[in-house]
Image (spheres, rainbow, N blue to C red):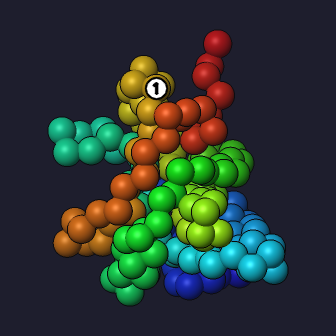
Amino acid sequence: MGEPAGGDAPANAQVGDGWTAVIEDMEATAAEYRERGWTTLELHPGDSVLVDSDRRTGLDVVLPGPEFEDLESLVGDREFRDVEVFRAEGDGLVYLLVVEIAPESETAAFVPAYYDPSRAAETIESIRDAGVVRLFCRRLNDDTVRFVHDDPTPFLPAPVE
């Protein structure tokens, strides 16, 4: 298996070829956006997990300092109001590629992530019940860029009937 671009895979679960595929998909999708003249930012989280705490509920990804600063600068004067979510399941994990989109400025931020749904069943239900999902992009000192989406469905595995 090849190494993911931009560093090692997040370490909170055992990831397989799925993570490499997400990174490759991110690179290809970002290239398509750039070919159309868009500004893009590809992020490479060092950790990714669903969280449900007093401080935050949603998808939490930890970014390297320079990438966080690039994201913070990117969102500073743009309105990211659209999102594309690509989801795949494998190796017991849910893999996501979240594309945060600011259509007026033709800007897109690409956030790859994954989580173990077997360890997050209560969090998944909490997000479904709330009808909203938050994506927290943060660095270790807890500075955070937050995206909020009114439809959590693309972020979550299909409900078990």
Quadrant of the rendering where the N terminus is positioned: bottom right
**Left or right of 110: which side holds 78?**
left
Report the residue at 44% width, 33% height from top.
Answer: 132
Counting from the top left corner in percent of width and height, residue 19 is at 64, 65
Q: Quadrant of residue 34?
A: bottom right
Counting from the top left corner in percent of width and height, residue 29 is at 76, 69
Which one is in front, 56 or 5?
56
SS of the residue under disc 1: loop
Report the residue at 38% width, 86% height from top.
Answer: 66
Task: Tell me the amino acid under the disc marked 1.
Answer: Gly
Q: Quadrant of residue 155?
A: top right
Density class for disc 1 (Cα within 10 Å; few <14, some 14-19, many ≥20) is: few
Which one is in front, 9 or 83?
83
Whether residue 43 is visible, yes or no, is yes
Vertical position of residue 55 compared to residue 20: above or below: above
- Residue lying farthest to the top in this orientation: 161
- Residue lying farthest to the front in this orientation: 104
Whether residue 121 is visible, yes or no, is no
Which one is in front, 104 or 7?
104
Counting from the top left corner in percent of width and height, residue 154 is at 63, 39
Counting from the top left corner in percent of width and height, residue 60 is at 38, 54
Report the residue at 46% width, 26% height from top.
Answer: 131
Quadrant of the rendering where the C terminus is positioned: top right
Give the total number of marks visible in the rendering. Answer: 1
Provide the residue designation for mark 1.
131
Vertical position of residue 132 compared to residue 4: above or below: above
